[in-house]
């Protein structure tokens, strides 16, 4: 699994920055396989030593996984503190076996409003179910979710939705699409899309092309995005995170 800083980079950063970098890295999902059906990979690079993106993935029963990517407004330590609190709440939803993406976002929206009234959070929450062969997603003001089918066709799930932390009682729409064996879903923060967009091409088009051309494995998808970011001349002032989930088979 990818990590945002090499050991050498951390050692050069000094003791305080080293501790913050370790904290950022330990917040990332550790499993590269979730059950027998799914493979995941994740990469996260904060704009500063630590940032406000939060990434999570966990199994739901024997044949499904939940994937989550959130982005707290702002950068640095204040955003990271909020992200840490939201991550703890997210873990409670995991323990409670909440498997509806919309219900999870509605619960998080209320908690962000109660605990962090000066902040908002964009988020994408997805349930990938191998038994049903489906992906169900809900979003809160987040960039489009991209899905590549087994033959390489890429589609985008688009939502009109408010970020978490703006209005009590916000309802979040769910959309369900087919997810056959060999398909891949990709979530990303707006730091990625902002860096890759250009006057000639929308970020979704650029990212869709990268997903289409990448090898099927989740790590190959993440590496393709990282290579594109290294080549990009886009702004690098925001946290960047990518989560790829590949349904194994075929």
Image (spheres, grey):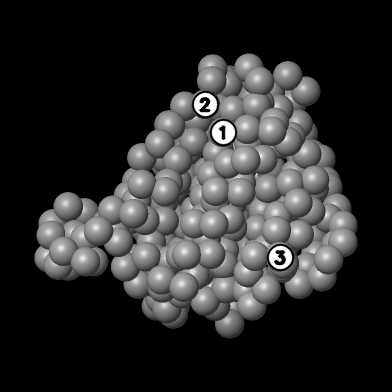
| Secondary structure found at label 2 | strand
Residue 114 is labelled as 3
Question: How far apart are labels 1 and 3 at the CA level?
Answer: 26 Å
Of the numbered discs 2 and 3, the one sitting upstream in the chain is: 2
Percent of width and height locating residue 213: 51, 47
Residue located 74% across and 34% down the image:
99
The C terminus - image quarter? top right
Question: How far apart are labels 2 and 1 at the CA level?
Answer: 7 Å
Residue located 80% across and 45% down the image:
103
| Secondary structure found at label 3 | helix
Residue 34 is labelled as 2
Of the numbered discs 2 and 1, the one sitting upstream in the chain is: 2
Pointers 2 and 1 in contact (CB under 8 A)?
yes
Between circles 1 and 3, the one closer to the viewer is 3
| Secondary structure found at label 1 | strand
Of the numbered discs 1 and 3, the one sitting upstream in the chain is: 1
Residue 58 is labelled as 1
Vertical relation: 222 (above or below) 65: below
Percent of width and height locating residue 147: 66, 45
Residue located 45% across and 40% down the image:
29
**Any part of residue 25 in sight:** yes
Between circles 2 and 3, the one closer to the viewer is 3
Question: How far apart are labels 2 and 3 at the CA level?
Answer: 33 Å
Vertical relation: 30 (above or below) 64: below
**Residue neighbourhood size for the residue with mark 1, other residues' Cα within 10 Å, grouped as few (<14), some (14–19), many (≥20):** some
**Residue neighbourhood size for the residue with mark 3, other residues' Cα within 10 Å, grouped as few (<14), some (14–19), many (≥20):** few
Dividing the picture into quarters, in which one does residue 193 lie?
bottom right
Dividing the picture into quarters, in which one does residue 117 lie?
bottom right
Percent of width and height locating residue 72: 57, 67
Pointers 2 and 3 in contact (CB under 8 A)?
no
């Amino acid at each position: 699994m990818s990590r945002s800083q090499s050991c050498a980079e951390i050692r050069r950063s000094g003791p305080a920055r080293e501790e913050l970098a370790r904290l950022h890295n330990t917040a990332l999902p550790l499993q590269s396989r979730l059950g027998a059906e799914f493979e995941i990979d994740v990469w996260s690079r904060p704009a500063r030593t630590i940032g406000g993106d939060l990434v999570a993935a966990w199994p739901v029963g024997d044949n499904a996984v939940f994937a989550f990517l959130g982005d707290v407004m702002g950068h640095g330590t204040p955003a990271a503190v909020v992200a840490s609190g939201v991550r703890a709440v997210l873990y409670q939803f995991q323990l409670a076996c909440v498997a509806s993406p919309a219900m999870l976002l509605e619960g998080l929206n209320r908690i962000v409003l109660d605990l962090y009234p000066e902040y908002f959070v964009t988020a994408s929450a997805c349930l990938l179910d191998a038994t049903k062969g489906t992906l169900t997603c809900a979003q809160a003001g987040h960039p489009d979710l991209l899905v590549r089918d087994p033959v390489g066709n890429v589609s985008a799930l688009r939502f009109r939705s408010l970020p978490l932390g703006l209005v009590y009682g916000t309802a979040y729409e769910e959309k369900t699409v087919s997810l056959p064996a060999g398909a891949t879903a990709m979530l990303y923060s707006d730091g990625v899309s902002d860096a890759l967009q250009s006057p000639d091409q929308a970020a979704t088009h650029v990212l869709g092309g990268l997903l289409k051309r990448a090898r099927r494995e989740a790590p190959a998808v993440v590496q393709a995005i990282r290579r594109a970011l290294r080549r990009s001349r886009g702004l690098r002032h925001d946290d960047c995170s990518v989560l790829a989930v590949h349904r194994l088979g075929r």
